[in-house]
């Protein structure tokens, strides 16, 4: 069950991580970078809800999907924190605690 719709949505979340991080390296105004990255993060976060909903609704739950979903969540949180750390919008100790918790 590697290619079910819910699993593909989870893979899409993982693939979207470089896109969200890459927005901060584009030559845009900082306000545009923040807006675009925030919107991408929200869309990707909504797919987190959607893949779980579809897996239950379509009866396509799998042990692989149950493994991959939290991995994708942790990668998203860690990458967002690293970007915020680089932009000095979060304290290094706070980022370390959150990433350590993940």
Image (tube, rainbow, N blue to C red):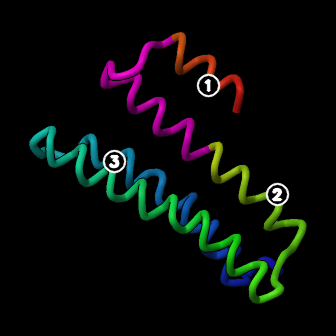
**Label 1 Cα neighbours within 10 Å, binned few <14 / some 14-19 / many ≥20:** few
Which is in the foreground here, disc 2 or disc 1? 1
Which is in the foreground here, disc 3 or disc 1? 1
- 28 in relation to 19, above or below: above
Q: Where does residue 58 sit, x and y in percent of width and height?
A: 76, 89
- Mark 2 — residue? 67
Separation of residues labelled 2 and 3 (CA atoms)? 26 Å
Residues at discs 2 and 3 in contact (Cβ within 8 Å): no
Magenta span of residues: 75-92
- 1 in relation to 18, above or below: below
Q: Where does residue 93 sit, x and y in percent of width and height?
A: 54, 10
Could you say whether the residue bearing mark 1 is in a helix, strand or loop?
helix
Q: If you read the primary sequence from the N terminus, does the residue marked by circle 3 or circle 1 appear first? A: 3
Q: Is residue 18 magenta?
A: no
- Mark 3 — residue? 22
User: Which secondary structure dominates the residues rendered in magenta?
Assistant: helix
Q: If you read the primary sequence from the N terminus, does the residue marked by circle 2 or circle 3 appear first? A: 3
Q: Residue drawn at (60%, 73%), measured in percent from left and top?
A: 50
Q: Where does residue 51 sit, x and y in percent of width and height?
A: 65, 73
Residues at discs 2 and 1 in contact (Cβ within 8 Å): no
- Judged left or right of residue 45, residue 101 is right
Q: Residue drawn at (23%, 50%), measured in percent from left and top?
A: 35
**Label 2 Cα neighbours within 10 Å, binned few <14 / some 14-19 / many ≥20:** few
- Closer-to-camera residue (50/74): 50
- 48 in relation to 81, above or below: below
- Which quadrant: the C terminus? top right
Separation of residues labelled 2 and 1 (CA atoms)? 20 Å
Could you say whether the residue bearing mark 2 is in a helix, strand or loop?
helix
Q: If you read the primary sequence from the N terminus, does the residue marked by circle 2 or circle 1 appear first? A: 2
- 21 in relation to 87, above or below: below
* Residue that lies at the very extreme toward the right in this rendered image: 63
- Mark 1 — residue? 98
């Amino acid at each position: 069950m590697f290619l079910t719709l819910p699993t593909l949505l989870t893979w899409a979340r993982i693939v979207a991580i470089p896109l969200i991080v890459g927005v901060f390296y584009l030559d845009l105004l900082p306000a545009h970078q923040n807006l675009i990255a925030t919107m991408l993060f929200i869309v990707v976060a909504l797919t987190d809800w959607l893949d779980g909903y579809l897996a239950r609704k379509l009866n396509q739950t799998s042990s692989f999907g149950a493994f991959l979903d939290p991995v994708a969540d942790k990668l998203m949180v860690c990458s967002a924190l690293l970007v915020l750390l680089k932009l000095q919008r979060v304290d290094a100790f706070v980022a370390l605690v959150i990433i350590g918790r993940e």
